Image (cartoon, grey):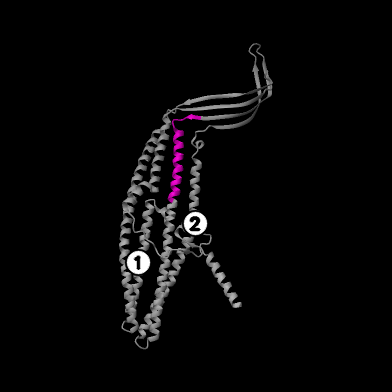
Amino acid sequence: MKRILMLAIVCSLLLTGQAQKQVYTLKSCLEEGLQNNYSLRITHNEEQVSKNNATLGNAGYLPTLDFSAGYKGTVDNTRTKVRESGETIKENGVFDQTIDVGLNLNWTIFDGFNIQANYQKLKELELQGETNTRIAIEDFVASLAAEYYNFVQQKIRLANLHYAVKLSKERLRIVERYHIGNFSRLDYQQAKVDFNADSAKYMKQQELLHTSRINLNELMANADVDQPLFIEDSIIKVNAHLNFEELWNATLQTNASLLKADQNTTIAQLDYKKVNSRNYPYLKLNTGYGYTFNKYDIASNSQRGNLGFNGGLTIGFNIFDGNRRREKRNASIAVKNSRLQRQELEQALRADISNLWQAYRNNLQLLNLERQNLIAAKENHEIAMERYMLGDLAGIEMREAQKSLLDAEERILSAEYDTKLCEISLLQISGKVLKYME
């Protein structure tokens, strides 16, 4: 009865541990990373700054209202000569005082469209902040997807190497059992060397898998970067149905870098408009409401108070400032450069997508070829093992058959991963990489 109870407890603990184990998919990794990644959170904060800056007040549309209060006192020695009598009157230590309190409003009504250009530029910078966030998100999705499939690749490679160790161990067992008969001591020593070599590769692969797991945890911003990761995918699924024309048309329409280049051109044009605004007059409104109190020491009135409103309009025109022509020429050059940079970027994207497409197509063909080679390598290894056990095949030839099988598995794995990387890059350039979130 006690044994049954203990068995039930152990089973319960095992089931609880399995229930707590979280299995990640690419989508869940991306969701967690997009929520927690530190670089993305910084980018989101920078986007919020650009949104906060895009206001009417920051552009100069709104007036400024100031409250001011002041006190002024003067102590003078005065000497006054009366014109009619010629008498000279001297007063020493004359103490006059002034106290003023008021509200002052200043408003630039028109300054040659500079305010309008400022506001449009701030709104464009706000859009560029959103574009920068989108670029960061797409880069992050591409990086995490590549690392996710690298983790899958390293797990598959570890399994392949574990299988290689298992084959080498079986070969060593066969030689140890029959080396007195059909197998020589040389076969035994060679089988032992091959087993040790495969074991060393397996141990090294464990290190590579550990590094990939650390990188994936870091991208997801997990507090414990060394925590175990359990992923759903055990193979690298390749999309073999991409279309070049669709990818290129999508690139021209939605590529975030091209969109940012267009925004840079718009910003340069607005800077040119701001320089041109100085060719127009400006109109400013100044108004205020306040109270002024004066206290006089020797005047005919001992004190005086004023409470009231004041206002005025100022119109002016900047005739010459020495920099306008230079700044206008530089602003015009900046507009031309932004357009050239946009064209250069489009050309670079065309080159990148063409190279990636060629690599993508080649890797797909290579993948199909390697899948056929893997079938042949497995058959060849099975035949070699049968002959080896019968003593009709030398150890070195058996090792070659085993190596051919492992090389075929490695080549097909590399082709799958390389094809996946090309797929991720093509989707990133065309602005479709967020499909991995679906």
Q: Residue 209: where, in percent of width, then height? A: 45, 66
Mostly what secondary structure, the magenta segment? Answer: helix
| 199 to 143, vertically: above or below | below
Whether 123 is among the magenta residues is yes
Quarter of the rendering occupied by the N terminus: bottom right
Q: CA distance from mark 2 to mark 1?
A: 31 Å
Q: Which mark is residue 32?
A: 2
- Residue underneath mark 1: 412
Q: Position of residue 341 (x, y in %)?
A: 35, 45
Residue type at tag 1:
Ile
Specify whether 369 is left or right of 85: left
Regarding mark 1 in the picture, which secondary structure is present there?
Answer: helix
Identify which residue is drawn at 32% across, 71% down: 375
Horizontal side of residue 173 vs 19, given as left or right? left
Q: How many marks?
A: 2
Residue drawn at x 31%, y 51% as measured from the top left:
245
**Going by the image, does 357 lie left or right of 23?**
left
Residue 205 in the image, given as x and y percentages of width and height: 43, 69
Q: Is residue 323 visible?
A: no
Q: Nearer the viewer, residue 91 or 401?
A: 401
Q: Which residues are the magenta region? A: 108-135
